[in-house]
Image (tube, rainbow, N blue to C red):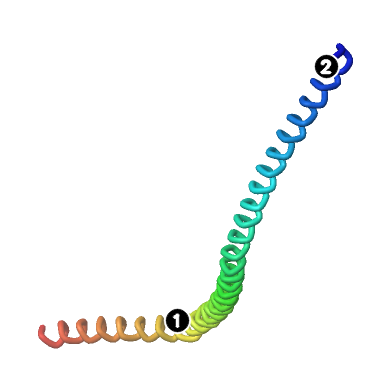
Amino acid sequence: MSATELAALIVAIASVVAVVLLGVALVSITRTLQEVRKAVQLLHSETVPVVAELGDTVRAANAELERVDDLLGTAESISGTVDSASRLAYLAFSNPMIKALALASGTSRAARSFRRQRSR
């Protein structure tokens, strides 16, 4: 065997070893990719229902927020109406009440004065 044939044999053996190593690496990568696919499918099957439920929860929360907003609007309206009514009642009754109290006070003073003069 000559040096050229020996070199060719070494290159051929090295090539076969390299091909075998690449084949083993390829098989390992293929298994890893299959496991990754399984994990992704499992993740997908578990997260899709969770995301759908989350969407339902968000929609329900939005509906409740709209309801609370409507209630707050109604409460503000009632508050404005009560404020207007109390202001109107104050304006309507304050002057007559002041006059009635003044009349009662004046009448009680006059009655006391009359009793004092009568008892003398």
Q: Can residue 80 be seen here?
A: no
Q: Residue at (22%, 86%) from the top-left corner?
A: 111
Eye-nearest disc, 1 or 2: 2
Is 117 in front, or is 74?
A: 74
Q: Give the x, y percent position of residue 7.
A: 84, 16
Can you say which quadrant of the picture contains the N terminus? top right
In the picture of the structure, the residue carrying the numbered disc 1 is 94
Is 118 placed left or right of 92 in the picture?
left
Mark 2 closeness class: few <14, some 14–19, many ≥20 residues within 10 Å: few
In the picture of the structure, the residue carrying the numbered disc 2 is 6
| Three-letter code for the amino acid on which mark 2 is drawn | Leu
Q: Give the x, y percent position of residue 107.
A: 29, 86
Residue that extends furthest to the front in the rendered view of this protein: 1
Is 77 in front, or is 109?
A: 77
The image shows residue 19, relative to residue 89, as above or below, that is above
Q: Give the x, y percent position of residue 79.
A: 52, 78
Is 103 in front, or is 28?
A: 28
Residue 111's disc is: none
Q: Distance between the residues labelled 1 and 2?
A: 124 Å
